[in-house]
Image: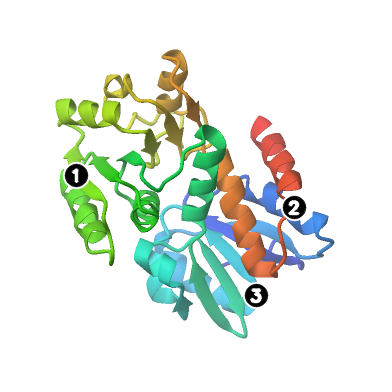
Amino acid sequence: MFVKEAENIKYAVIGDPVAHSVSPAMQNAAFMAAGLSERYGKYHVVPEKLAEFVEFARRNLLGFNATVPHKSALIGLLDEITPEALAARSVNTVTVRGNRLYGDSTDGYGLETALKESFGFNIAGGRIVLLGAGGAAQAAAFEFVRRGAAEVTVINRTVSKAEALVRALAAVEGANTALTALGNDEINQAAAAIAACDVVIQATSSGLHPDDAPPLALEILREAPAIFDMIYKNTPVLQFAKNNNIPCADGRLMLLHQGAKSFSIWTMRPAATAAMRDALDEALSK
């Protein structure tokens, strides 16, 4: 079922969908800059084939990244998981060593670094509104709480999922973050939370496909001080921000920095982030 694209493909990204991913271009730039012969590919893995892929990786790969919708499902399929990934309930980086699979999450690091680079924003003491309550939002939210954010408001289409995430966040040991869950239809409360925050994080898959609906009524975002969209495309949220002169950034910096961290975990070497950035920008320009 999973055929290696070439003999030297030892790393990959998996997802459903995955054809849009520019991670191979970025990671291969890092491998080449480091003088390593291994190469990085991609595999389209549907959820019902995830366990089968994990065993394929155990026999054939040295590591892989995971994107939607596999980050949470991987937890029960790996041999060891870092405390950070367990706390976030999300794995995006898997390392294969000695026939054992180790799970980690570099999403939090990537997002934290991207927010600082984009807006000069520091998580500690920050007030954050998070759009979405899925895997990407969970990883971000747990990182915010662990890093000492003052406030986190989760806004989701299904409010029960936002509430479940907030309950899990409240249980984090040592947590001292004010937490709120809202539904998309709670327009006045959502608008007030957005106006009072430091940054809005768009963490849903909205914008991955051209015909995707926005994650909430865009007018609610009019008073946002800054917007970061995890999708590295011109999503409805980003276009609204640009049209209304709201400082904004797409997800390419998060992708860059989480990818650099993954590379370092796999190879135990620093990543050539400048080469990765150039390759990422070139791939996205196409």
- Which image quadrant: the C terminus? top right
Crowdedness of circle 1 by 10 Å Cα count: few (<14), some, many (20+)?
A: many
Q: Is residue 222 above or below residue 84?
A: above
Q: How is the image coloured?
A: rainbow
Q: Which residue is mark 3?
A: 60
Q: Is residue 277 above or below residue 220?
A: below
- Residue beneath the point at 38% across and 74% down: 76
Q: Is residue 127 above or below residue 14?
A: above
State if disc 3 and disc 1 touch (CB < 8 Å): no
Q: Amino acid at mark 2?
A: Ala
> What secondary structure is marked by label 3?
helix
Q: Which residue is mark 1?
A: 181
Kindly indicate the quadrant of the structure image that contains residue 38: bottom right
Q: Seen in the image, is 115 located left or right of residue 166?
A: right
**Residue 20 showing in the rendered view:** no
| Closest to the observer, 178 or 267 | 178
